[in-house]
Image (cartoon, helix red, strand yellow):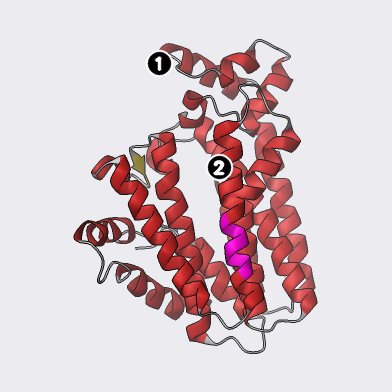
Amino acid sequence: MRGATHSTFYAPVEAELHELERRLLDVGRGGHATFQAAVRHLFSSPGKLLRPTLVFLSARFGTVPDREIVLNLAQSLELVHTASLVHDDIVDRADVRRNVPTVNAMWSDDVALIVGDYLFAKAYALAAVLPKPEVIAIVAQTVFALCDGELNEVTMERRLPTEDAYLERIELKTASLYAACCQGAALLADAEPEHVAALGAYGTSLGLAFQITDDVLDVAGDEADFGKTVGRELAEGMATLPMIYAVDETGDRSLGPRIVSPGKSPEELRELLRIIRDSGGVERARERALSFHDDAVAALAALPDRPERDALREIADFVVGRVR
């Protein structure tokens, strides 16, 4: 079942989403028994499906939104997203995502690595039959961006990044996929060039708002609601925007090295979380997420006034709703 089922932005594309959910559960057919089991585990509770919802809504602004072709793009990009999460969980040594065990926790890191590769291969196979080479290129470029963003994260020096460096990283690892969903679908459906550009801008800003929101919740959220362990990035020494702002707000230059240091004890982790939460850095990061929300909404002004545009606005509100 999709998360956020109370939200009305799903309504215009409900039929497409039901078909996508059926296809995702069918991805493992013909594969190794372990892959089939992992697919059932991953897609029995597929999450919010925001990205395919963006694909289906964005395609409605085109002149030829072929349902089957758009479904292929939506499935391809959702498989890219899921594969990247499976690999991220290996890197992060995460045991839980969406309140359920990760693939690496259920099986092993080796199995999770191969499952992620399998999902990427399935995504490429779907993208390969899309009728527009530029959209196939967008799918490939998105995977490059995700990999670059993740490599930037795992190879960065143990020092506090600048705000600009942080934003560049999350644009690669998160916002690039949101932009691909919106821009790729509009191109596939032969939307007007100005509408393609507006949807691409919307997707980028939406993705930035989404990731900053996630990073706020990682230091200030409730684990039961968040679906992931709070403080995971801090425990790994991965500095995010609320942490960067906390150092600036407190003026404590010793705080930065403590944040990026790995191997923190539980006591130090709790102390650092308290300092960050009390610093004003969390609130400042919330405001930054809201500014990207406003940029996303502003981009929608270039689109025709129709229910799909209203739904895109509701998605923007939903993405930052947890930080208001």
Q: Could you say which disc has been placed on residue 150 in the image?
A: 2
Q: Specify whether residue 182 is painted magenta.
A: no
Q: Nearer the viewer, residue 305 or 260?
A: 260
SS at badge 2: helix
Q: Which residue in the protein does label 1 denote?
A: 266
User: Can residue 314 be seen?
Assistant: no
Residue 231 is situated, as x and y percent measured from the top left of the image, at 47, 28
Q: Amino acid at mark 2?
A: Glu
Q: Which residue is painted at 59% across and 54% down in the image?
A: 144
Q: Earlier in the sequence, mark 2 or mark 1?
A: 2
Q: Could you say which disc has been placed on residue 308 in the image?
A: none
Q: Nearer the viewer, residue 170 or 130?
A: 130
**Does the magenta stretch mainly form a helix, a strand or a loop?**
helix
Q: Amino acid at mark 1?
A: Pro
Q: Which residues are magenta?
A: 137-143
Q: Which residue is painted at 74% across and 54% down in the image?
A: 294
Q: Which residue is painted at 67% across and 27% down in the image?
A: 244
User: Can residue 86 be seen?
Assistant: yes
Residue 70 is situated, as x and y percent measured from the top left of the image, at 53, 79
Q: Nearer the viewer, mark 2 or mark 1?
A: 2
Q: How many marks?
A: 2
* Left/right of residue 37 with respect to residue 202 in the rendered view: left
Residue 198 is situated, as x and y percent measured from the top left of the image, at 75, 68
SS at badge 1: helix
Quarter of the image with the C terminus is top right
Q: Which residue is painted at 29% across and 60% down in the image?
A: 39
